[in-house]
Amino acid sequence: MQLPCYPNFAPLVLDMQSEIQPLLARLPDGVSEFTFANLYLFRKRYAYRVCLAQGVEPDERAIIISGERDGKKFFETPSFSPDQEILLSLFETHDYWKCIPDSVLHPNKALIERCGVEITEDRDNFDYLYLRTDLAELSGKKFHKKRNLVNAFLNMYIPQVEELTESKIPLALKILERWRAGKGEEGDYTASREALDLFGVLGLRGNIYYINNYPVGWCLGESLANGTMFGVHFEKGLDEYKGIYQYINQNFAASLDEQYVYINREQDLGDEGLRQAKMTYRPIGFVRKYMGTIASGG
C-alpha cells in the first residue's frame, strides 16, 4: 500500500508495514515509539495517521505521524525536521510536536527556533536505558535487593524458560487473560493481545515462563537503534508468584544476544510509582525526547 504524500494523511494499517518499517529501522536514537510494531499496536489509542514528506536528502522520503490524545492533536517526525513551510503548516492543524529525538533536534535547533517553536524536555516520555549486562548479572551492592528477590524466587520455584514461538501464543494469551482478571483493569491489554496475535508478522521476539509446566509469564520486544538496543514492549506475569517480574527481567536480559549493549524499558508516562520502580534498576541514561510548541506571539 502506497503512503500518501503530505499534506494528505491516511490511517495507519498493517499493509503499510513494508513501506514504513525500512524508514524506521535505521533510526539511531532507539525511541521506543518509533517502530512499525509499536505504532501499529497503539494506533487506536492515538488515532495514528501517516504520510510521506521530503527528507533531508533530495531523493529521501521521511514519515510524518499524526495522532491525538486527551483531546489534543500532535505530530511526530522520527527522522527529520520539516522545512519552515511544512513545520508551520503542521502547527496550524496540530497542538504540539511530540517525541522529537536528539538526532532531529540538535542539528536543526536554530532553524526550529527561528520558526518560533519552543522546545522543552518531555521527561514523562523519556525511555529508560539500562546496560544489558547490568540487568542480566545484577552484580554489586546497588542491585542486592533485586538479586535477593530473584534468588528468593528461584529458591521457591523451579522455572522453565522457552523462547516464545507461534505454537506457544495460546499459552501466552491465557497468561494475559489471567493478568487482566487479576488487575481488574484493561491497562495495555488490547495492545498486548494484538502483539501476541501478530507476533510473527510484526517480527517480535520474547520468552515464555513456566512453573511446574504451568505458564506464568512472558515478555516481548524488538531490536532498536541498528541492533545495539533491545526494546521491551510488554512484560506480563502472574502476581501470585512473588518475584516473577524481577526474574523475567533478569532472565530475559541474560538470554539476549551480546550485540545488544542496552535494554530500553520505555517510559513512565509521569506515573510516580512506575518512575520509582524503573529508577531502582539504576538506568545508565535515557532516550531523551522533546516537545515543540509555538511560542507565544509566534
Image (cartoon, helix red, strand yellow):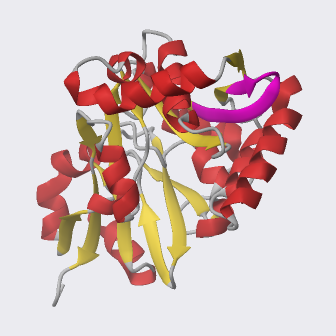
Residue 11: image location, x then y, percent: 69, 64
User: Residue at coordinates 43% horizontally, 23% vertically from top-left?
Assistant: 226
Rendered image quadrant of residue 196: top right
Residue lying farthest to the bottom in this orientation: 297
Is 266 displayed left or right of 220 in the figure? left
User: Residue at coordinates 20% horizontally, 63% vertically from top-left?
Assistant: 112
Is residue 22 among what the camera can see?
yes
Residue 223 shown in magenta: no
Quarter of the figure that contains the C terminus: bottom left
Q: Which residues are magenta?
A: 208-221
Residue 230: image location, x then y, percent: 47, 28
Is 83 displayed left or right of 79 in the figure? left
Residue 62: image location, x then y, percent: 47, 47
With respect to residue 159, does 225 lie above or below? below
User: Residue at coordinates 36% horizontally, 39% vertically from top-left?
Assistant: 57
Residue 28: image location, x then y, percent: 35, 32
With respect to residue 121, does 241 lie above or below? above
Q: How many marks?
A: 0
**Depth check, front residue: 112 or 145:** 145
With respect to residue 104, does 144 lie above or below? above
Residue lying farthest to the front in this orientation: 156
**Depth check, front residue: 226 or 146:** 146
User: Residue at coordinates 84% horizontally, 43% vertically from top-left?
Assistant: 174
Residue 211 shown in magenta: yes
Rendered image quadrant of residue 46: bottom right
Is 134 displayed left or right of 202 in the figure? left
Is residue 11 among what the camera can see?
no
Most common SS among magenta residues: strand
Is 3 displayed left or right of 26 in the figure? right
